[in-house]
Amino acid sequence: MTARLRLVTILLPVVLSACGANDNDPGPGGVTVGEAKALDEAAEMLEKRGRSPADANAEQAERLRQAQAQNGSDVHAPE
């Protein structure tokens, strides 16, 4: 009886670990679980980076337009 209980105690975690999602299993949105994890990591990386270069360029162009409007300049900011 003790040997059987010991065997069940050892094998139960091994058997249960096989129940988890596999990286190739279908996930949300038609992508695999592994792809979904990779997309989540990429999104987190982008969020940590802050604003995009396009946003920074748009802000800089707007500041230039405002400065030109105050100075009456006819020079146009790059689009």
Image: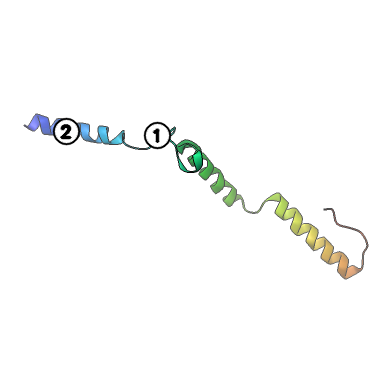
CB atoms at circles 1 and 2 under 8 Å apart?
A: no
Q: Coloring scheme of the render?
A: rainbow
Q: Residue furthest bottom?
A: 70
Residue occupied by mark 2: 8
Residue under the image location 10 percent in, 29 percent down? 3
**Distance of mark 1 from mark 2, alpha carbons?**
24 Å
Please name which of the two marks, 1 or 2, marks the residue nearer to the observer: 1
Q: Position of residue 32 (x, y in %)?
A: 47, 36
Q: Earlier in the sequence, mark 1 or mark 2?
A: 2
Q: Give the side of residue 21 with respect to residue 32, left or right.
A: left
Residue type, mark 2 in image: Val
Crowding at dot 2, Cα within 10 Å, few <14 / some 14-19 / many 20+, comes out as few
Residue 44, placed above or below residue 38:
below
Residue 66, placed above or below residue 51:
below
Residue under the image location 75 percent in, 53 percent down? 57
Q: Position of residue 59 (x, y in %)?
A: 74, 59
Residue type, mark 1 in image: Asn
Q: Quadrant of the N terminus?
A: top left
Residue occupied by mark 1: 22
